[in-house]
Amino acid sequence: MSQSQQCAIALGSNLGDSSAILEAAIVMLAKTPGITVTSQSSWYQTAPVGPPQPDYLNGCVIIDVQLTPQDLLQITLSIEKQFGRERRERWGPRTLDLDILLFDNLIIDTPTLQIPHPRMSERAFVLVPLAEIAPDWLEPISGCAIAQLVQRVDCSGVHPV
Ligand code: GSY
């Protein structure tokens, strides 16, 4: 695959040294052949969505990829694993979460991979950082720009650090 495509990835952590883990995850993405990190949002301290647990640190990156969505998924899962991520409690605390949000304007719905990320449009902790770096990107199912979607959610639990 020679042509590159643009992809948005959400990062989150609420276990361990979250700031160091998230920065190191971006370095690992950037070192991966076929991936170029082109922009990075600020980090945000965010109130947890799900069961009671510590606040998260969240952010987003935009990358250029010369990989298939499935290959990119395997890379994100492998990076999560290297930071000690164990998939135990579904909504529980985690050292590192890497979610593929958008992959160009593709819509993918398989048992292992859904793009756009199925819950991105309702999550302020995703939309606020994404709107900072990609306000005009159209979420392909709704056809709405990220800047529009962020106006529809409660952003009171999302604070830049
Ligand atoms: O889905 C990502 C993991 N996660 C998060 C998160 O990253 N941030 C916040 N604020 N709440 C969350 N709940 C879950 S699960």
Image (cartoon, grey):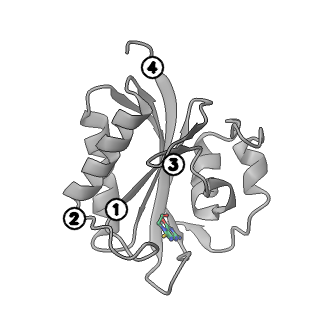
Task: Say which residue appears at 23% left-offset and 60% top-offset.
Answer: 83
Residue picked out by circle 1: 96
Q: Earlier in the sequence, mark 2 or mark 4?
A: 4
SS label for mark 2: loop
Relative to 143, say whether 78 is above or below.
below
Amino acid at dot 4: Ser
Relative to 87, say whether 146 is above or below.
above
The residues bearing labels 1 and 2 have C-alpha atoms spaced at a distance of: 8 Å
Residue picked out by circle 3: 41
Amino acid at dot 3: Ser
Q: Earlier in the sequence, mark 1 or mark 2?
A: 2
Residue picked out by circle 4: 4
What mark, if any, has residue 84 been given in the picture? 2
Task: Say which residue appears at 65% left-offset and 48% top-offset.
Answer: 131
Which quadrant would the N terminus be assigned to in this image? top left
In the image, 67 versus 15, the foreground residue is 67
